[in-house]
């Protein structure tokens, strides 16, 4: 039997062109499976070892040695105390295996068939791994393949000998492909699906758009141009922000090409997606103006604390700035990474007047001054009690106040700040515990919420994301996270 085992291993290795160790591993697995079936205890752990030189093999049943508190599976585990009782002088430790020799099972027809199936499967796995590694070594960003089949969860694309997947969420909406169609996509990642690996492609990512321009515009590959940012509404509209590293080159014209040849080539590849090429700028205001094109901007107001920009446009430019379904302003916001608030000149004036009235009222109430004095402060750009309290005294004197009045205003402002701070802390004591302990809500946010009249978790949960951003000045991501945490108990109650 030992000679026959070696002959079988040699024949299978030669026939399938694989390493003999692959064959021996499969034979050991097949013999172990046969031993478990013979014992009618398929959950037990069996190990078979074949001598590569003589062909002799031995069968062992083994148990993993575990601590008492971890003992769960009697068929495959023994406690360390149990082993020490059975073998008093044992050197085995927790985590090692205790083995008992079993009678060898004859290598019959069923075991041979099982071994052959395992060998074939391992050969296929090895071939897939080799093909995948060759594909990854090429480091292709954009791949060209053939549609092999269209499934409910996506498109299977054949790239040479490799099958890749474009999931539904990475496909451009309303695109239709049939078997045999040529398709171009971006390599996105490799997903682990059990023992197998699946290459995932994308046609909707921003990087795909950027790589298509790099292929179409040689100046980008040469480093003369850069695509600094990109934003997409896949299949409908996109914006790219470009920068020239050579003053002699027009970045927009170069990307568009003669009679739109270059930009049309990219657009045709992504189902006719309309692409705006805008100039990138280090200045936030100018970049926002460029990003909102073709709309004309009248005025820009930047709020660094809230990371937001108020964009003022003429009445006839409002629809163009917002775009159909808010598409233009949404893409511009993605491109610039700023929250953009579009408003007309009239709306801006009304908002500015309301803000001035609120500041004026604040000064009248807390500085104990008349409206004329409050107006002077507002017109000179003072917007808070802190500015009055801590601005250099000379600046207030330059406005026209005498030194005694300046000292009085500064002292009143400091007293008002202290009084408001004490009142704010007292209000925090009235906040419900479920809001205080909510993940993502810190003391600064609590103060802002209390100031807005929100004292419990449900009050926060009822806010829209934009409302929370306006109240607290947090980022969109933080606002989404906090509101979802506040609403979590609603979903639990529904369940």
Image (cartoon, rainbow, N blue to C red):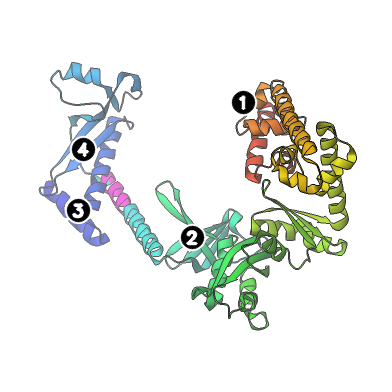
Q: Which is more N-terminal, label 3 or label 2?
A: 3
Measure the C-alpha gap from mark 1 to mark 4. Answer: 64 Å
Which residues fall within the magenta stretch?
Answer: 110-119
Q: Which is more N-terminal, label 3 or label 4?
A: 3
Measure the C-alpha gap from mark 2 to mark 4. Answer: 43 Å
Measure the C-alpha gap from mark 3 to mark 1. Answer: 66 Å
Front residue of 136/485: it is 485
Residue 111 in magenta? yes
Front residue of 447/110: it is 447
Q: Which is more N-terminal, label 4 or label 1?
A: 4
Front residue of 24/209: it is 209
Residue at label 1? 437
**Which secondary structure dominates the residues rendered in magenta?**
helix
Q: Which is more N-terminal, label 2 or label 1?
A: 2
**Residue 125 sits in which quadrant?**
bottom left
Residue at label 2? 164
Q: Nearer the viewer, mark 1 or mark 4?
A: 1
Labels 1 and 4 touching (C-beta < 8 A): no
Measure the C-alpha gap from mark 2 to mark 3. Answer: 34 Å
Measured as percent of width and height from the top left, residue 46 is found at 25, 35
How many other residues sit within 10 Å of disc 4, few (<14), some (14-19) or many (≥20)? some
Measure the C-alpha gap from mark 1 to mark 2. Answer: 46 Å
Residue 372 in magenta? no
How many other residues sit within 10 Å of disc 3, few (<14), some (14-19) or many (≥20)? many
Q: Nearer the viewer, mark 4 or mark 3?
A: 3
Relative to residue 424, is residue 30 drawn left or right?
left
């Amino acid at each position: 039997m030992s000679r026959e085992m070696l002959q079988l291993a040699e024949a299978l290795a030669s026939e399938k062109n694989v390493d003999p160790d692959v064959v021996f591993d499969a034979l050991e697995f097949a013999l172990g499976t046969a031993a478990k079936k013979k014992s009618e205890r398929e959950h037990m752990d069996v190990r078979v070892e074949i001598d590569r030189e003589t062909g002799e093999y031995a069968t062992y049943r083994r148990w993993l040695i575990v601590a008492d508190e971890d003992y769960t599976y009697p068929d495959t585990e023994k406690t360390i105390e149990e082993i020490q009782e059975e073998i008093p002088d044992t050197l085995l430790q927790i985590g090692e295996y205790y083995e008992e020799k079993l009678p060898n099972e004859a290598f019959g027809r069923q075991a041979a068939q099982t071994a052959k199936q395992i060998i074939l499967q391992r050969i296929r796995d090895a071939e897939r791994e080799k093909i995948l590694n060759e594909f990854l070594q090429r480091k292709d960003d954009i791949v060209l393949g053939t549609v092999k089949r269209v499934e409910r969860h996506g498109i299977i694309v054949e790239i040479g000998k490799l099958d890749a997947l474009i999931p539904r969420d990475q496909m451009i909406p309303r695109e239709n492909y049939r078997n045999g169609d040529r398709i171009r996509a971006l390599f996105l990642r490799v997903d682990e699906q059990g023992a197998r690996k699946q290459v995932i492609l994308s046609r909707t990512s921003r990087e795909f758009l950027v790589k298509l321009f790099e292929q179409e515009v040689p100046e980008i590959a040469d480093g003369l141009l850069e695509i600094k940012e990109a934003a997409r509404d896949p299949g409908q509209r996109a914006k790219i922000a470009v920068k020239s590293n050579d003053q002699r080159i027009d970045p927009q014209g170069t990307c568009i090409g003669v009679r739109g040849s270059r930009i049309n080539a990219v657009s045709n590849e992504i189902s006719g997606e309309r692409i705006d090429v805008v100039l990138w700028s280090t200045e936030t205001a100018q970049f926002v103006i460029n990003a909102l094109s073709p709309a004309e901007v009248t005025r820009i107001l930047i709020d660094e604390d809230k990371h937001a920009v108020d964009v003022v446009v003429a009445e006839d430019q409002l629809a163009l700035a917002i775009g159909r379904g808010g598409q233009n302003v949404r893409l511009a916001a993605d491109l610039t990474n700023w929250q953009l608030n579009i408003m007309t000149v009239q709306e801006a004036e009304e908002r500015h007047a309301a803000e001035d009235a609120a500041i004026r009222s604040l000064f009248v109430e807390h500085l104990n001054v008349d409206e004329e004095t409050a107006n002077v402060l507002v017109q000179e750009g003072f917007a808070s009690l802190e500015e009055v309290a801590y601005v250099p005294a000379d600046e207030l004197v330059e406005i026209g106040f005498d030194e005694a009045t300046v000292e009085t205003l500064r002292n009143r402002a400091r007293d008002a700040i202290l009084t408001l701070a004490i009142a704010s802390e007292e209000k925090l004591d009235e906040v419900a515990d479920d809001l205080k302990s909510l993940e993502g809500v810190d003391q600064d946010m609590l103060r802002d919420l209390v100031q807005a009249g929100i004292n419990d978790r449900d009050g926060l949960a009822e806010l829209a994301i934009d409302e929370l951003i306006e109240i607290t000045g947090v980022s969109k991501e933080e606002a989404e996270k906090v509101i979802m945490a506040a609403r979590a108990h609603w979903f639990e109650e529904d369940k």
